[in-house]
Image (cartoon, grey):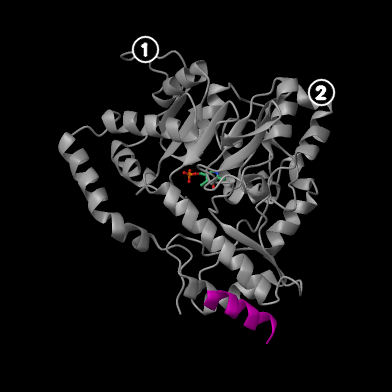
Amino acid sequence: MKIPLLDLKAQLDPIRDEIMAAITATVDSTCYIMGPQIELFEKNMADYCGTGAAIGVSSGTDALLASLMALGVGRDDLVLTTPYSFFATMGSILRLGARPVFADIDPVTFNIDPAKVAALLADSSLAARVKAIMPVHLFGQCADMAPLLKIAGELHIPVVEDAAQAIGAAYPMTVDGAVQWQKAGSMGLYGCFSFFPSKNLGGMGDGGMVVTNSDKMAKDLRLIRVHGDISKYQHTVVGGNFRLDAMQAAILNVKLLHLPKWHAARRQNATLYNALFKDAGLVEAGYVATPQAVYQDAAAAGEGVDYHIYNQYVIRVKDRDALRDYLLEQSIGVAVYYPIPLHKQKCVADLASSRLSLPVSEKAAAETLALPIYPELTSEMQEYLVERIRAFYKK
Ligand SMILES: *Cc1c(COP(=O)(O)O)cnc(C)c1O
């Protein structure tokens, strides 16, 4: 049985007519840059995330870059982030001449560890140079935001959330003694999203969004999106061309309506994988550790809370590379996110951080494997895949 890592055709088929109608309408409108589809999508995203504003941008990478630009991050500034993420997290910092400072991750969630953030920021001379803290909500589950926001608030350091993999993911914030579910991207000063086709909400090309509850930060970001042009060729700051295409917005307006059901299907697939791995004895034997949804218990009372949106279903395994090759040979699409932690990338070999030991990230990079989790994946496929993994260990 062939099982792809992601099957965009299976997602497209049932919504093809809706998408084509939206594309046709946009083509006929001749409004290709900004305009009503962008405005509508920004409104829809602000509503969905529970924020005051949303600003469409050209990609998730540019969402991060433009956010840091709006915060004035520049040469020799520091940005505190995780070493275990997609390259764009660090790339956006480096492109501004700033330097990443890495706090290692939590071994259970793979997200930045707030205790390690606190330990780093206890050094006041370092803290004074940190211009932003950038947590990543990796694989579709929010980083532990309450302690991060507390530390950041005490030191007046803005938080920029890299929510590229976590659109709609909810975090149980305790407000006045009661749990209030807050959406990824809505908790920091800026929240950044990507509509790369493999994200839970994927466009048909590149796209991104920044959300914020600050009117001022929304205004600054809108300026940076269009070369700092306040009106007709009057440039107050240097920005870029960071606009989202109207065509992508039209497509995404259609797809956003389907997102809750896609999240739920991914969650259901995750639940089935968890049970299958357990029943196969692979968990108990120590071959496979299934992902932990750490906010699931808090969500138990509220059906439909997106406590994890499973952009990726990532297991820890013994003999990872051999298992990956074994599955790929059998046309089972698996992938390693990410094989090299950011501090070990060649392009930053000259930075002092490349000599750091960040053991939790380094171990994760060596042990993790992402399995297909897309909404249209069938239970037969999942059963077959788990059976193949069982065969690998018990041969
Ligand atoms: C996808 C992704 C990005 C970048 O998004 P693009 O739209 O591809 O530029 C940034 N950070 C993380 C964690 C991502 O997964």
Residue 250 in the image: state x and y as whole percent. 29, 40
How many marks overall?
Answer: 2
Does residue 127 sit above or below 206 in this rendering? above
Residue 178: which quarter of the image?
A: top right
| Nearer to the camera, 127 or 19 | 19
Give the x, y percent position of residue 312: 56, 56
Q: Compute the Cα span from label 1 to label 2.
A: 38 Å
Label 2 CA crowd tier, 10 Å (few <14, some 14–19, many 20+)? few
- Name of the residue lying farthest toward the left: 28
- Identify the residue position indicated by label 1 in the image: 234
Q: Residues within 10 Å of mark 1 (few under 14, many from 20)?
A: few
Q: Is residue 99 visible?
A: yes
Q: Main secondary structure of the magenta part?
A: helix
Q: Residue at x 77, y 52 (%)?
A: 360
Q: What's under tag 1, amino acid-wise? A: Gln
Answer with left or right where residue 245 lies relative to residue 362: left
Which region of the structure is painted magenta? Answer: 383-395
Q: Quadrant of the C terminus?
A: bottom right
Task: Tell me the element at label 1.
Answer: loop
Across and down, in percent, residue 173 comes to 65, 34
Looking at the picture, how far across and down is residue 274, in whole percent? 63, 65
Looking at the rendered structure, the kind of residue marked 2 is: Ser
